[in-house]
Amino acid sequence: MTAAAPSRPQRLHRLWILAAVALAVFVGANAHLVYVAFSSEPGCVAHLKDKSGTPGGYRAAKSAC
C-alpha cells in the first residue's frame, strides 16, 4: 500500500509553517547580531605603536588609546 499524497490545503499549510519558521530564524539571527553589536565594547588591544620593518607587523592607523 502507498500512502495518500497530502491534499493541496495541507501542502499550503506546511509551506506557510516552513516560511514562518524560516522568517523567525532570520529575524532572530539578525536581532542577535544587532544585540551583540551594541552590547560589546572592545577596549584597547595590544598592537604595534611604531612602524615595524617586519613583514606582517601591522599597527593601528590611528590609535584610540
Image (tube, helix red, strand yellow):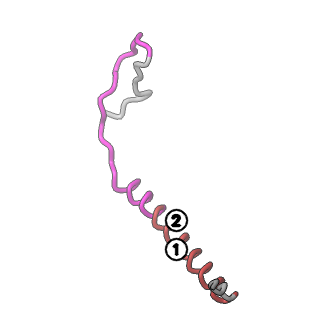
Instruction: Give the percent coordinates (x, y) of residue 12.
Output: 65, 83
The structure residue drawn at horizontal position 34% and vertical position 51%, both measured from the top left corner, is 40
Type of secondary structure dominating the magenta stretch? loop
Instruction: Give the percent coordinates (x, y) of residue 6.
Output: 65, 86
Q: Is residue 53 above or below residue 4?
A: above
> Which of the two residues, 58 or 3, is positioned nearer the viewer here?
3
Instruction: Give the residue type at disc 2.
Output: Phe
Instruction: Give the percent coordinates (x, y) of residue 61.
Output: 44, 27
> Which of the two residues, 56 or 61, is positioned nearer the viewer here?
56
> Which of the two residues, 37 or 17, is positioned nearer the viewer here?
17
Distance from the alpha carbon under mark 2 to that under mark 1: 9 Å
Kindly report which numbered mark, 2 or 1, lies closer to the viewer in this rendering: 1
When asked about the image quadrant of residue 20, the answer is: bottom right
Q: Is residue 5 left or right of residue 63?
A: right
Please name the residue that numbered disc 1 is placed on.
Answer: 21
Q: What crowding class fits label 1: few (fewer than 14 Cα within 10 Å), some (14-19), or many (20 or more)? A: few
Q: Which quadrant holds the C terminus?
A: top left
> Which of the two residues, 15 or 55, is positioned nearer the viewer here?
15
Q: What crowding class fits label 2: few (fewer than 14 Cα within 10 Å), some (14-19), or many (20 or more)? A: few
Q: Is residue 42 magenta?
A: yes
When asked about the image quadrant of residue 58, the answer is: top left
The structure residue drawn at horizontal position 44% and vertical position 14%, both measured from the top left corner, is 55
Please name the residue that numbered disc 2 is placed on.
Answer: 26
Work out which residue is located at the far right of the displayed protein and give it.
8
Looking at the rendering, the stretch of residues picked out in magenta corresponds to 30-55
Q: Is residue 45 above or below residue 40?
A: above
Q: Is residue 5 above or below residue 49?
A: below
Instruction: Give the residue type at disc 1.
Output: Val
Work out which residue is located at the far front of the displayed protein and give it.
1
Q: Which quadrant holds the N terminus?
A: bottom right
